[in-house]
Image (tube, rainbow, N blue to C red):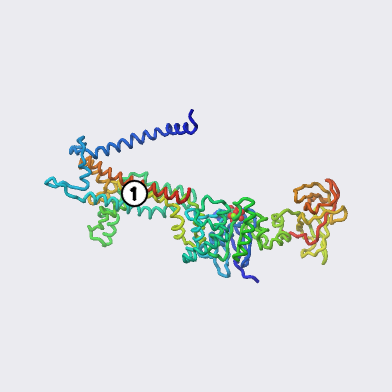
Amino acid sequence: MAEIAVDVQNIVKHYGSFVALNDVSLSIQDNEFFTLLGPSGCGKTTLLRSIAGFEEVTEGKIFLYGEEIEDLAPHQRPINTVFQHYALFPHMTVHDNIAFGLKRLGKSQAEIDKTVKEMLALVQMEDFGNRRTNNMSGGQMQRIALARALAPKPKVLLLDEPLSALDLKLRQAMRDELQKLQRDTGITFIFVTHDQDEAMSMSDRIAVMSNGQVQQVGTPDEIYNRPKSRFVADFIGDTNIVDVTIEATDAKSTLYRSKGGVGLQVERATDLTVGAEISINVRPENVVIVDAGKGRADATLTHKSFFGRTSIYSMELNDGTLIKSRYSSRDELGRKEMAIGDSVGIDFAADTLAELTS
Amino acid sequence: MSTAFEKSARTRWLALSPTYLIIGIFMMIPLCIMIGISFMEQNVYGGVHPNVSFAAYQQILFETDFDENLVFDPSYLVIIGRSLLLAGIATVVTVLVGFPVAYYIARQNERRRNLLIFLVTLPFWTNMLIRIFAWLLILGRGGVIDAPLRFLGVLDADGSLGLLYSPGAVVLGLTYTYLPLMVLPIYASLEKLDFRLVEAAADLYSNKWGAIRHVVIPLTGPGIAAGAILVFIPCMGDFITVDMLGGAKNLMLGTLVQFQFSTARNWPFGSAVAAILLIFVICNMLLYARFTRAERQRSGS
Ligand SMILES: Nc1ncnc2c1ncn2[C@@H]1O[C@H](COP(=O)(O)OP(=O)(O)OP(=O)(O)O)[C@@H](O)[C@H]1O
Ligand SMILES: [Mg+2]
């Protein structure tokens, strides 16, 4: 079992009567790229600032490699932050910005110069040491902010939406760079974003948050394919969610019945009992269109949208429930043309279904 | 044909002409008169004799003895030195007091900030003589400070700490009078400061003082310099505070000028001292201009 870098235990944060964090617990492992993902206002920044020490938590404990830190001031925590708007010091050169933390730590001048050089090389800005930070491009400032935060070799690096101010192309390039940087330095990264693609493509694990609570923690694969709640399923990507009741279940299969009376027999067991009211989730790319009568349920094709790389087919089950199916253009090759109004069947592999219990 | 640029330059001139007129009539002409008078001969009954003379400037450094010889006399130099020293100390003290005040105000929410700024400027709405008179009552013989000490037996029944009419009292009075002029420009530059930079400094292992020293003070330098100018210059020329709290022993340039025009009736000498004062002011402004230019070059905009 890997060592735990940051252990957040039952954190509660109030702003007056407003509850920004409601009993949040997380264990972030050493050398992990961990992402906090959630919609605007869900408390990601508040959690990050609590770890950095800028916010005092109302209740709960925070441990850094086993040491309790919630009473330490920010400058006493071996944690550095890459701020969303960089917060580079405008009165200093790039070199002095990167050297700032090292100087405060009382490192020798030789060591400072050596580290700054290494950092500039790490972010590919070797020639910029003597420049001032104003008039630099967003991407350059981003790199300097990264170099500045990495220079003191913190135990944990916090990044609050560091890519949101960059344009799309640069953002994608920086994703790869950040990932590489994390691997090269071996520092634990806690990354905040509300962009699910960013979270999915970079992270080892993701915590999905909403309304000041952690909804689910897991690998990108688990979060995407095994969502536990309606919120997580809906927030990450496109999906089909159907409200159902469990009608029958045995060791091998389960029968779900929708509110409108459509039954779905799926060859897998459930922990839930007969009569439980839940939702089930199947991603559109896992929904296969087959001939009428041959699938798990029959449906009518109501709409087709072509997006170039993929096409989305919208269908209605007999009770009016909307189901979407996504086909990549390659899979479409050689498939027979379908017209709006056609009767079709829908099918999906049993293990692509996820039960959403809340 | 005139280009748009020329036209706009001309309209700008027109629009600014009242300003130039007012500056000309109320500032430049009196200034010229003052300098003119400083090169004339004294009329002991007030006014001047319109003859060219350098006696006034001579008087600053030399005294005429009984045999009509010029003898070096440092007493006016002492006054100039004292003015520089006390105004300098008062400026330093206002920075030391004004900066924390401005910092505290800048960290409050907007409503509180406006209220506090109003409170800082409040003394300006009260008559200056009355405010200085209050200090007389506090510092004076048997005043607010002496009285309880007498009662406690620390001082004799008619003893006094002798706080009034001392250089310390002058510095105190000047600090008290001009403190708002220091707080306001520092506050203005703190208000523009991005306090996320302070967080960044804290994140990078600076304690509170380190963040202030390495981030806040360098970035509010122009505000501190502006405040220092705004305080130092009027301190040099002040005569009410200096006169009331310093008494006859602690003459400064302002009180000297006032004395020459009222009691001594030596207009040329008063004007000459005022001209010296003006030179100090101009030197200060030049220094400030150089400082801000360097500052702007440094921040690269
Ligand atoms: N200082 C504060 N005082 C009062 N409420 C605050 C304060 N800071 C944050 N909040 C509230 O706490 C909630 C969570 O804020 P937070 O900044 O953590 O959200 P976030 O998830 O980072 O959102 P975003 O993606 O928009 O940055 C928000 O509703 C916000 O209004
Ligand atoms: Mg945020």
Q: Residue furthest front?
A: A127
Q: Residue furthest right?
A: A293
| x and y percentages locating residue A276 in the rendered image | 77, 60
| x and y percentages locating residue B282 in the rendered image | 33, 45
Tell me which residue sits at (62%, 66%) in the image.
A31
Q: Nearer the viewer, residue A181 or B230?
A: A181
Q: Nearer the viewer, residue A58 or A3?
A: A3
Q: Residue furthest top?
A: B1
Q: Nearer the viewer, residue A294 or B176?
A: A294
Observer able to see residue B112: no
Horizontally, residue B98 falls left or right of residue B50, namely: right
Observer able to see residue A145: yes
Horizontally, residue B197 falls left or right of residue A169, namely: left
Q: Secondary structure at mark 1?
A: helix
Q: Is residue B23 above or below residue A344?
A: above
| x and y percentages locating residue A124 in the rendered image | 57, 58
Tell me which residue sits at (24%, 40%) in the image.
B38
Tell me which residue sits at (59%, 61%) in the image.
A12
Q: Nearer the viewer, residue B2 or B10?
A: B2
The residue identified by callout 1 is B232
Q: Is residue B194 above or below residue B14?
A: below
Q: Does ligand 1 reach within 8 Å of label 1's beta carbon? A: no
Chain letter of disc 1 in the image: B
Q: Amino acid at mark 1?
A: Phe
| x and y percentages locating residue B99 in the rendered image | 41, 53
